[in-house]
């Protein structure tokens, strides 16, 4: 072998060994974090205000009706639906309406915008035997992360002298969890 070639090979091997000796490895960790806060959805919607808890529609009645019943329905035509984080205890509080105590025969009233009122009440059963008072609460079982149904019913009571028209009310609702 040629002496200069041998020197070059030995120099190359020596350089390769020197480069390998300078290589190093460093190890460590990455920390990942996610913070979840308790939350709820009402009829599929979320937020902290302005949620649609549903509608109570007594239908179309003649002005001489005796009683008209209805159920609070959420979006999609089913009963009100509450979906909360697992482990929470949802409580629905049905607050004051715009025309409470304006007509004998019910704690709440529907108003025609002129001077006429139709009394009504909320009930927690379809048979209308358990009245839900103003600021009354419905406490649901501890949530498992599955939507829970809230059945809330209404019964309006007719009275003499009601003119034809559209009668409405707006009732505030609060959800705690």
Image: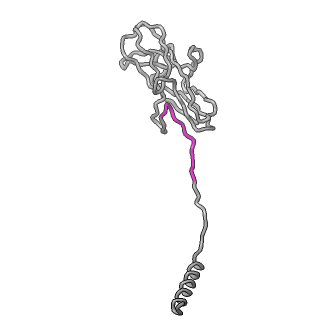
Q: Considering depth in this image, is 118 or 67 the residue closer to the camera? A: 67
The percent position of residue 71, horizontal first and vertical second, equals 50, 19
Q: Which residues are magenta?
A: 33-44
Quadrant where the image shows the C terminus: top right
The percent position of residue 11, horizontal first and vertical second, equals 54, 87
Residue at 57% of width from left, 29% of height from top? 148
The percent position of residue 41, horizontal first and vertical second, equals 51, 35
Q: Is residue 41 magenta?
A: yes
Predominant secondary structure, magenta span: loop
Q: State whether residue 73 is above or below residue 164.
A: below
Quadrant where the image shows the N terminus: bottom right
Q: Choose top left, top right, bottom left or bottom right for residue 20.
A: bottom right
Residue at 56% of width from left, 30% of height from top? 92
Q: Considering depth in this image, is 1 or 155 the residue closer to the camera? A: 1
The percent position of residue 99, horizontal first and vertical second, equals 45, 22
Q: State whether residue 98 is above or below residue 7.
A: above
């Amino acid at each position: 072998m040629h002496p200069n070639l041998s020197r070059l090979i030995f120099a190359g091997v020596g350089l390769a060994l020197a480069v390998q000796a300078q290589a190093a490895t460093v190890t460590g960790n990455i920390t990942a974090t996610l913070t979840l806060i308790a939350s709820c959805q009402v009829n599929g919607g979320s937020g902290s205000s302005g949620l649609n808890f549903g509608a109570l529609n007594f239908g179309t009645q003649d002005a001489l009706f005796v009683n008209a019943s209805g159920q609070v329905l959420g979006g999609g035509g089913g009963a009100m639906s509450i979906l909360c984080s697992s482990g929470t205890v949802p409580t629905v509080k049905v607050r004051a309406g715009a025309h409470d105590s304006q007509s004998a025969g019910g704690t709440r009233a529907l108003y025609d915008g002129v001077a006429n009122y139709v009394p009504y009440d909320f009930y927690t059963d379809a048979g209308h035997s358990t009245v839900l008072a103003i600021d009354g609460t419905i406490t649901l079982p501890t949530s498992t992360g599955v939507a829970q149904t809230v059945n809330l019913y209404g019964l309006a009571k007719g009275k003499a002298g009601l003119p034809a028209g559209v009668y409405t009310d707006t009732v505030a609702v609060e959800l705690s969890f």
